[in-house]
Image (cartoon, rainbow, N blue to C red):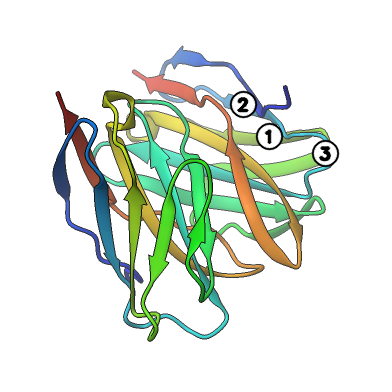
Amino acid sequence: DARVTQTPRHKVTEMGQEVTMRCQPILGHNTVFWYRQTMMQGLELLAYFRNRAPLDDSGMPKDRFSAEMPDATLATLKIQPSEPRDSAVYFCASGLVQGAFGELFFGEGSRLTVL
Amino acid sequence: DAKTTQPPSMDCAEGRAANLPCNHSTISGNEYVYWYRQIHSQGPQYIIHGLKNNETNEMASLIITEDRKSSTLILPHATLRDTAVYYCIVRPAMGDMRFGAGTRLTVKP
């Protein structure tokens, strides 16, 4: 049963620490999205990649967030330094884009708490 | 700049059809209508999408008006497990996927 895998599922850290979240997209998918969800802002698009190339990262605070795809099986979202306002659930999603776009598959999310 | 407008909440009786409306009056000719739902704190789940024609799958039906300015997601026989936030999204074929506030559907026994 193919699924998007995110690690860690839960992370508690202190302000100023570096946080790295990882995502393993479904094998064969060529598009990966990173989202952040909070009660106040809902689901926000942070960045997305196609064929490992970043297409849009305008939703990310550039000074502290970075997103990469070192290879087709791994996407990373890094926060350095972390702040309490970064506390949220971070979702990764992957999909296969061939002409018209079909279904996005979401991971279970990484819940981040920054103290 | 929201592309879609949905009611913030709706109730539905268990076993009845749930009809969730979505307005997308500024939709462009190459933009699709997608529906996702999010149950509790899980990741969103794809339901259905369409361009012009009505669509049906094992989960739901999507009715798009002829002018494409609005659509309705129909869950034919709602169950308690359909309680979730439902998102209507408009996007071009190769574009990004941005979620609005959605409609919180509560299915009641």
Please tell me how crowded label 2 is: few (under 14), some (14-19), or many (20+) other residues with Cα within 10 Å: some
Dot 3 corresponds to which residue? A70
Closer to the camera, B17 or A88?
A: B17
Are the residues flagged by discs 3 and 2 from a single subunit?
A: yes
Q: Earlier in the sequence, mark 1 or mark 2?
A: 2
Residue B38, relative to residue A15: is it above or below?
Answer: below
Q: CA distance from mark 1 to mark 2?
A: 7 Å
The chain that hosts pointer 1 is: A
Closer to the camera, A42 or B84?
A: B84
Q: Earlier in the sequence, mark 3 or mark 1?
A: 3
Dot 2 corresponds to which residue? A20
Q: Quick check: marks 1 and 2 in contact, CB under 8 Å?
A: yes
**Which amino acid is tagged 3?**
Pro
Q: Give the quarter of the figure containing the C terminus of chain A.
A: top left
Q: Give the quarter of the figure containing the N terminus of chain A.
A: top right
Please tell me how crowded label 1 is: few (under 14), some (14-19), or many (20+) other residues with Cα within 10 Å: some
Q: Position of residue A27 (x, y in %)?
A: 82, 35
Residue B6, relative to residue A86: is it above or below?
Answer: below
Mark 2: secondary structure: strand
Q: Position of residue A69 (x, y in %)?
A: 77, 42
Dot 1 corresponds to which residue? A76
The chain that hosts pointer 3 is: A
Are the residues flagged by discs 3 and 1 from a single subunit?
A: yes
Visible residue check, residue B76: yes
Is residue A48 left or right of B18 when viewed as pictured? right
Are the residues flagged by discs 1 and 2 from a single subunit?
A: yes
Q: Quick check: marks 3 and 1 in contact, CB under 8 Å?
A: yes
